[in-house]
Amino acid sequence: MSAQREQKSMNEPILRDPSLEDPQAASGARQSTVPIADARPADVEMARVLGTTPFHMALDSSGGGIAHWKHEPLHDVVEPMTHHVIMAYNGTMQRMERRTGRSVAIGTFRPRVVIIIPEGSSSRWDIPKPVDVVQLYLPHATLKRVADEAETAAPIDLLERTAHPDPIASRLLLSAADILEGNEALDTLFRHQLTDLLATRLLAAHTGAPTTFQLTMGGLSPKVLLLAIERLRSDSDADVSLAALASDAGLSRFHFCRAFKESTGLSPHAWLRQHRLEQAMDMLRDTDAPVVSVAAALGYSSQTAFAAAFKKLTGDTPSNWRRRTK
């Protein structure tokens, strides 16, 4: 047994169970210690255990959303939460230990791995160095909706994962740290789109019976596509949520995103982001409106947030771009 452990990859957690009475726990099955109704929301529990405020956080009314944390070494118990928590690590490589019941998992935090804490589970964490991590808080109802929309009958109980290799989920989640840009419509659309993508990935790779998705081919009809584009082009106060777009099309969110990208080559979020950039360029070139007014008209929370988003896409600040094009 010890020889097998020595051959494990640095990415693979080492699982120990002194009593060997609970093999399901050691294999990473979902743990539940208290009723979900008595557990804390994920953002509340993370703030308590990490002892700091998030670098960035965006939540919806269900408490689901995305948070970017930079925190000090951790030696504490994470109590049960009302959400599944999925984490992608963005720091230097380090070893860590996670204790759940009788089992101990020793893994390596590094890029391209994920950590999954299923709702209702509780573990002690020992992490010796500072941590930079992006977290998804996923309500179980959202996971179930995505499973239903994908028409899968497989079980949807998530496995507990400790530094488990998954470059796809890790890359998707870490992208949130760069994309959220202070525009409520864009950020909400991106967050919902990313949540559904990650839920799909979790169902495919991190349940007791991984799901195979059978996707139908084809995009939106011209009429439905025009309706979606009209909504996306409407003023900054319009409802451009994924739920509203999918409802107009008479499709689930899962199928709408796939069909929209099939038709346009872009996700709904990427299309809206490009459209807002074109609007900004038109206003900067054709009017004398102050940059702060352009930012407000396009729904950005501040001139600074708008300037950062504009520079990310064009390589230049709004003021410099205006001077060059006038």
Image: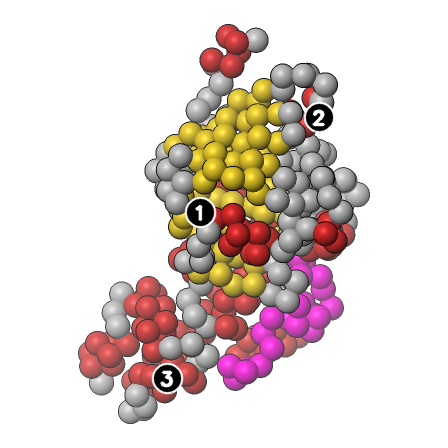
Question: Closer to the camera: disc 2 or disc 3?
Answer: 2
Q: CA distance from mark 1 to mark 2?
A: 28 Å
For residue 312, what is the image quadrant?
A: bottom left
Q: Amino acid at mark 2?
A: Gln
Q: Position of residue 88 (x, y in %)?
A: 48, 44
- Using the image, determine if residue 156 lies above or below residue 103: below
Q: Amino acid at mark 1?
A: Val
Looking at the picture, tell me which residue is in the foreground, 285 or 133: 133
What residue span does the magenta drawing correspond to?
234-262
- Using the image, determine if residue 31 lies above or below residue 283: above
Question: Looking at the image, can residue 200 be seen?
Answer: no
Marks 2 and 3, the one that precedes in the sequence: 2
Label 3: which residue?
A: 294
Question: Looking at the image, can residue 67 be seen?
Answer: yes
Label 2: which residue?
A: 24
Q: Position of residue 273 (x, y in %)?
A: 45, 69
Q: Position of residue 55 (x, y in %)?
A: 41, 58
Marks 1 and 2, the one that precedes in the sequence: 2
